[in-house]
Amino acid sequence: MAPPGSGPAGTGPQPPQPQGRVNPAIVVPFYNHERAIAATVAGLRPYRLHCWIVDDGSDPRCRPVLEQLERLEGAWLKVLYQAPNRGKGHAVMSGMRAAAAAGHSHCVQIDADGQHDAGQLQLLLDQAQRHPAAVITGVPRYDASVPKGRLYGRYLTHLWVWINTLSFEIRDSMCGFRVYPVEPALRVWDEQRVGRRMQFDTEILVRLFWQGTRVVSVPVSVTYPRDGVSHFDLWRDNLRIAGMHARLFFGMLRRLPQLLALRLHAQEQP
């Protein structure tokens, strides 16, 4: 499927247009992916959506790359800088807040490292049009580049998410390629304790589900980073993720009547 608004060659991106009830923007959390970001931006360009790259305290060598991209791409692309490094979650939500201030109702989250196929973004946007109150999240279809340890480790998180939501609606909580409705996402971020780093993608999705936000899954292709840079720390991030699952489990126990009511309501739907 061709990206929306791909006009004659050489015309370049035009001002973004609201898509019905959904007026989306793009947020790209960025940390030391200077070798991959140009290709990621090139994949997003045909969609003609406003885009915020949020530099999360990257090394100084990255700034000239981002400044050049912002200069070459024009008004559709802006770079926000935050320092020191505060974590992926903080970067995503800073970009989302900027998008909300600009009048956008939804935000696409996509990683800077090239593992997500921007050509499949239209699949997520189509579902956002059909389900504007829902989070639309990718379910990865991996190629041979996926590290086996990371692949198998995801299943433990899947199991805990299903326990903590009493539901199989969240098929994959770790994929960072998704479309958020801005208002409920910012409310959860502002009012609840959400992990800022590698636990962010899973935790905000579970907490949105607890608040009654539906989750719609879309299969997407995933290739592990082209620039070979991974910021996952085996011990530190696994400890953070374990702590997150413990917090969510006790949160689930407090919300048990509400979650059972949500489950019963879902079963009654035609």
Image (spheres, helix red, strand yellow):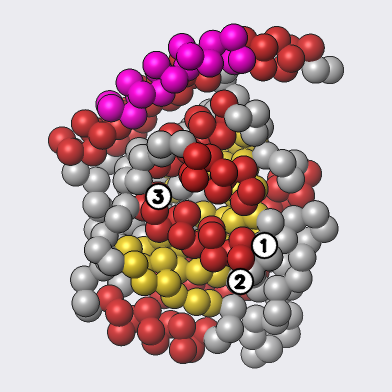
Q: Kindly check if marks 2 and 3 are in contact, taking CB atoms under 8 A apart as contact.
A: no
- Residue 89 is tagged as 3
Q: Position of residue 241 (x, y in %)?
A: 30, 32
Which type of secondary structure does the marked residue at label 3 adopt?
Answer: helix
Confirm or deny contact between disc 1 and disc 2 (CB under 8 A). Answer: yes
Distance (Cα) linking label 2 and label 3: 20 Å
Report the residue at 78% width, 61% height from top: 19
- Residue beneath the point at 28% across and 76% down: 62
Look at discs 1 and 2 and give the one toward the viewer: 1
Q: Position of residue 25 (x, y in %)?
A: 61, 63
- Residue 10's place in the image compared with 177, above or below, is below
**Residue 245 drawn above or below residue 98:** above
Residue topped by disc 1:
104
Return the x and y of residue 29 as percentages of the image width and height: 41, 60
The single residue placed furthest to the left in the displayed view is 235
Residue where numbered disc 2 is placed: 50
Q: Can residue 237 be seen here? A: yes
User: Of the residues shown, which amino acid type is indicated by label 2?
Assistant: His
Is residue 189 or residue 236 the one in the foreground? 189
Q: On the rendered structure, is 198 left or right of 93? A: left
- In the rendered image, which quarter contains the C terminus? top right
Q: CA distance from mark 1 to mark 2?
A: 9 Å
Q: Which residues are magenta?
A: 242-259
